[in-house]
Image (tube, rainbow, N blue to C red):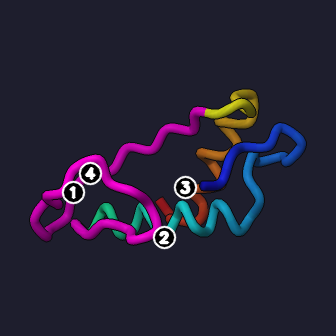
Amino acid sequence: MMLGDADVETGYEPAALDAWSERVKYWSSGASPQDLPSLESAQPGPGPRDVFVYFINGAKERAPAAALALLERLKL
């Protein structure tokens, strides 16, 4: 798992934000990313869904920059 870093302007290295962007795309399409554990054995059915992302880590002062960098990658 990629943790936030207060020494990085966006809170995450570019590769980490790219990985989160891909995960958000999976979730929003109704799929589940395979590189993260799931709390439930049953996965939701296919189809679009809303995705909410929270940047909660030790680099909380970088959370707004991380959110903006993720949105830029998602082109939202």
- Kindly report the secondary structure that dominates the magenta region of the rendered protein: loop
The local crowd at label 1, few if under 14, some if 14 to 19, many if 20 or more residues have their Cα within 10 Å, is some
The local crowd at label 4, few if under 14, some if 14 to 19, many if 20 or more residues have their Cα within 10 Å, is few
Looking at the rendered image, the quarter that the N terminus falls into is: bottom right
* Mark in the foreground, 4 or 2: 2
The single residue placed furthest to the right in the displayed view is: 7
The amino acid type of the residue labelled 3 equals Leu
Highlighted range, magenta: 30-56
Residue at left 39%, top 71%?
34
Q: Secondary structure at mark 4?
A: loop
Q: Of marks 2 and 1, which one's residue comes earlier in the chain?
A: 2
**Which residue occupies the foreground of this view, 76 or 67?**
67
Residue at left 72%, top 30%?
58
Looking at the picture, how far across and down is residue 2, in whole percent?
65, 54
The amino acid type of the residue labelled 2 equals Glu
Disc 1 from disc 3: Cα separation: 17 Å
Q: Which residue is mark 2?
A: 22
Above or below 54: residue 3: below
Is residue 55 rendered magenta in the image?
Answer: yes
Disc 4 from disc 2: Cα separation: 15 Å
The local crowd at label 2, few if under 14, some if 14 to 19, many if 20 or more residues have their Cα within 10 Å, is some
Residue at left 32%, top 62%?
27
Q: Secondary structure at mark 3?
A: helix
Residue at left 14%, top 68%?
47
* Mark in the foreground, 3 or 2: 2
The amino acid type of the residue labelled 4 equals Asp
Q: Which residue is mark 3?
A: 71
Q: Of marks 4 and 2, which one's residue comes earlier in the chain?
A: 2
Q: Which residue is mark 4?
A: 50
**Which residue occupies the foreground of this view, 22 or 36?**
36
